[in-house]
Image (tube, grey):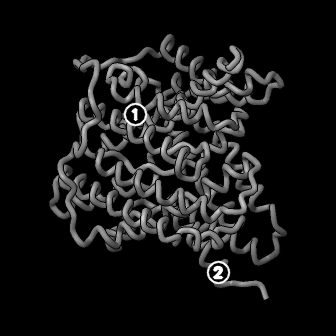
Amino acid sequence: MSKSTFSNTAMETLQWFVFLLAGIVALPIVIGVIFEMNFEEIAGLMQRSFFAVGIASLLQGLFGHRLPIVEGPAGLWVSVFAVMAFTGMQNGMSLTGTLQNLMAILIVTGIFLFLFGVFKIAQKLLPIFTPLVTGIFFLLLTVQLSGTFLKGMLGIEGDSSTIQVMEATIAFLTFVLILGLSLLRWRWLKNYAILIGIVIGWIIYILVVGVQVPSVHIGLFSVPEMFAFGKPTFDLSVIPISFILAIIIISNLVASIVAMNQTLELNHNDSGRQLNQGTVLTGINHGLSGVFSVIGNVPLAASSGFVTLTNQKRKAPFLYASILLIIVSFFPPIISFISSIPSPIANAAIMASFIQLVGLGIRNLASEHLDNRKITIIGVAYLVGMGTMFLPSQVFQALPSMMQPIMSNGLLVGTMLAILIEQLWKNK
């Protein structure tokens, strides 16, 4: 390997690594706040998340769908965790007991996904994910998560309920810097736009705002703990919830694979096999998430936005970054340092990559002639899905507990509605 090739691979690996980190650091903290965890418990959750994401991404890249798609904590699972915490307290269950129940749901969901892939059931769902459905999925996904990213950029997190002007200013400077670099003609700057943007934004944040480092003693080396919340609690109620979640996760997997194939300009004639293998590995990864007590990991569609933004289409640096993440997960001081990436900066980087995902959604919708039937389906699914996102969570309390995390998720409601209408309303 020549020196220039090695240098390019090293830089691309580092940028993939930074992108992996940006997708991890926020959600474990959110879950920690919901379940009233202390700093050490959140640090442990972060360590296990690093390990699980690294393993999941590596396995998918080598043996699953074999695409450079980051596996990361799923917004769907955060919704499930939040709803289960609320309903669990209503039913007199402790937060620890709820977490043990959630780990059981993760494991059973993984079993369903594994079976769907092994018996080639997943590929039978492929025809329903038309360009119309995937286009709606991408647009609703960006709408759903843009609010979370924007709040993070504005510093509205934890105890902060108002805009933090200085943090927000630095975040938007980072956002504009990443976009500006990605539009330049100089390939080197364009290819490393996210890495450069995060590093510069982080330095400015430290100089202007500063950082607070908790005075807690941590060891130099530790192995990620298994069953950190105790042994999973299995009962019959987890089966229907897990089955529904498995079907929904397949829809996310299809959208992520379609997006990356389009970005890499790949024309897979055997997309069914690609989906089956990806579903098998997603099942295994969900089982690992349950064993290591972390949020369920799914393929992140934002990966295609990252590839488009940086023009990094090689898979090898992605695999090296996944291995690096696994290694780092055994060293708590490094995790503590990485976890100090300011949330406004990480959210600004992800928001920049989501711009490309908006374009991908529009291209999917425009790939076929938009007649009155398709425009009606898009309008109904988009408005109902987006409207659901603005409903307060209390309105769903009358529904069965297994349906609450599904019906309160506008992305899922809109996507399922698009599938249902398109399958029932056929062209003559």
Residue 328 falls in image quadrant = top left
Give the camera-side residue of 66 and 28: 66
> Does residue 153 appear anywhere in the picture?
no
Q: Which label is found at residue 107?
A: none
- Residue 207 in picture, x, y percent from top left: 50, 10
* Residue drawn 74% across the image and 51% down it: 266
- Please state if 259 lies on the left or on the right of 20 as rendered: right
In the rendered image, the residue lying farthest to the bottom is 428
Q: What's the amino acid at mark 2? A: Gln
Residue 160 falls in image quadrant = top left
Q: Are marks 2 and 1 in contact (CB under 8 Å)?
A: no
Q: Which residue is mark 2?
A: 423
- Residue 183 in picture, x, y percent from top left: 78, 30
Query: Circle 1 sits in a helix, a strand or a loop, which is it?
Result: loop
The mark nearer the N terminus, 2 or 1, is 1
Q: Which label is found at residue 160?
A: 1
- Please state if 427 lies on the left or on the right of 201 as rendered: right
* Residue drawn 16% across the image and 53% down it: 94
Q: CA distance from mark 2 to mark 1?
A: 45 Å
